């Protein structure tokens, strides 16, 4: 699992997460519009490597940090489990999610944690007879008080995400 928490950094415009020596280096490019500058997810790694989070500020500056990601090998070049038993087509695109409200010490709602999982093989195209096939965009939206759609965040995703990708976000209370 990879988690990037940039909530303590003011004016975050974008969060890009990538793995240095991965066959498909970029995992996500997250624009937290109304959402907090926080994202967590799982990704495939071909080998142990540095996983970096680059946070772009509104003034264009970038802040970068990294952690060591360990892998046994295979990652992007291993077929998804669902391709082996051919069950992926029956469940393709199914989603599940939940929203949990975390209370602060004074009992008021501090934030909302949103979990989202999407059933998808996230094929990298690196396995013979499995063409590239992955989710490339996710828009997080909510209904506003007047019924209008409110943009919470935008996510560009890449084939290095794990099969049936799961995401965690923090929304304002």
Image: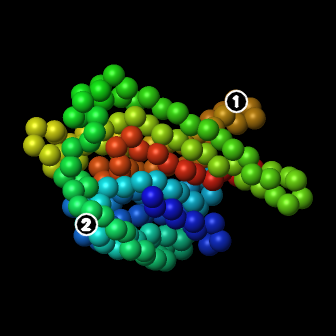
Colour scheme used in the picture?
rainbow
- Are the two marked residues, 2 and 1, in contact with CB atoms closer than 8 angstroms? no
* Helix, strand or loop status at disc 2: loop
Residue 32 horizontal side relative to residue 121, left or right: right
Does the image show residue 158? no
Task: Give the answer, above or below, for where 34 lies relative to 81.
Answer: below
Disc number at residue 50? none
Residue 131: image quadrant is top left
Q: Residue at x 50, y 48 (%)?
A: 167
Which residue position is annotated with label 1?
Answer: 147
Q: Residue at x 85, y 60 (%)?
A: 105
The Cα–Cα distance between marks 2 and 1, rounded to whole angstroms, is 47 Å
Task: Give the answer, above or below, for where 18 lies relative to 162.
Answer: below
Q: Quadrant of the N terminus?
A: bottom left
Task: Give the answer, above or below, for where 155 lies relative to 144.
Answer: below
* Crowding near the residue tagged with mark 2, few <14, some 14–19, many ≥20 C-alpha atoms within 10 Å: some
Does the image show residue 44? yes
* Helix, strand or loop status at disc 1: loop
Disc number at residue 47? 2
Q: Position of residue 151 (x, y in %)?
A: 59, 44
Q: Residue at x 37, y 55 (%)?
A: 43
Q: Position of residue 144 (x, y in %)?
A: 70, 36
Q: Position of residue 48 (x, y in %)?
A: 29, 70
Question: Mark 2 vs mark 1: which is more N-terminal?
Answer: 2
């Amino acid at each position: 699992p990879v988690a990037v928490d940039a909530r303590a950094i003011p004016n975050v415009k974008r969060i890009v997460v990538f793995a240095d020596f991965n066959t498909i280096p970029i995992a996500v490019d997250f624009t937290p519009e109304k959402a907090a500058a926080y994202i967590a997810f799982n990704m495939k790694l071909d080998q142990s490597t540095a996983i970096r989070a680059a946070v772009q500020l509104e003034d264009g500056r970038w802040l970068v940090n990294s952690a060591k990601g360990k892998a046994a090998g295979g990652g992007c070049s291993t077929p998804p489990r669902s391709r082996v038993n051919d069950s992926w087509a029956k469940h393709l695109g199914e989603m599940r999610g939940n929203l949990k409200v975390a209370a602060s010490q004074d009992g008021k709602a501090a934030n909302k944690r949103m979990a989202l999982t999407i059933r998808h093989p996230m094929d990298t195209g690196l396995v013979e007879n499995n063409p590239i096939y992955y989710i490339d965009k996710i828009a997080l939206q909510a209904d506003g008080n007047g019924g209008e759609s409110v943009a919470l965040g935008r996510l560009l995703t890449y084939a290095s995400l794990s099969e049936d990708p799961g995401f965690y976000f923090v929304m304002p209370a």
